[in-house]
Amino acid sequence: MIWIGLTPRSNASTYFYQAARTAVIIANEEQINGNYRNAHDLLFSMVQELKQRNIHVPFEMFENLTLLHSYILAKVGY
């Protein structure tokens, strides 16, 4: 996954910027290992946290979450 578009503006946003980057890295590892639900849950919680704090959610993070969500829905047969 390519990381583009989020630059920290304050100490708090720097913390969340780093946390978001870490979440994407961990979620990618979970996907590689076939743990799609874990990857989805991690990205979902990070997106929720960023939104609650009015911090921009990077497109790549949101796109990856959307793909995981669709995969999980298809897998369970909805």
Image (cartoon, grey):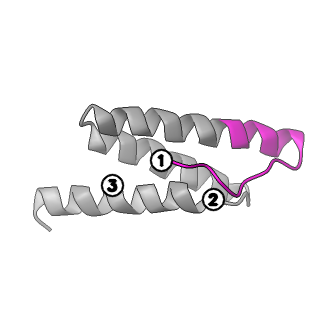
Q: Secondary structure at mark 1?
A: helix
Mark carried by residue 57: 2
CA–CA distance in space, label 1 to label 3: 9 Å
Q: Amino acid at mark 1?
A: Leu
- Work out which quarter of the rendered image holds the C terminus and state it: bottom left
Gap in angstroms between the C-alphas marked 3 and 2: 16 Å
Q: CA distance from mark 1 to mark 2?
A: 11 Å
Q: Are marks 1 and 3 in contact (CB under 8 Å)?
A: yes
Residue 7 relative to residue 33: left or right = right
Name the residue that disc number 1 marks: 43
- Which class describes the residues within 10 Å of circle 2: few (<14), some (14-19), or many (20+)? some
Q: Is residue 2 magenta?
A: yes
Where residue 9 appears, x then y in whole percent?
88, 50
x%, y% of residue 53? 72, 55
Residue contact between numbered discs 3 and 2, judged by CB atoms under 8 Å: no
Tell me which numbered mark, 1 or 3, is placed earlier along the sequence. Answer: 1
Residue placed at 53% from the left, 54% from the top?
61
Q: Quadrant of residue 42?
A: top left
Look at label 2 and name its amino acid. Val
Which residue is the site of mark 3?
68
User: Which residue is situated farthest in the left direction here?
Assistant: 77
Query: Residue at 38% of width from left, 42% of height from top?
Result: 39
Considering every residue shown, the one lying at the far right of the view is: 10
Residues 55 and 27: in front is: 27
For image coordinates 62% across by 42% down, the residue present is: 20
Residue 57 lies, in percent from the top left, at 63, 59
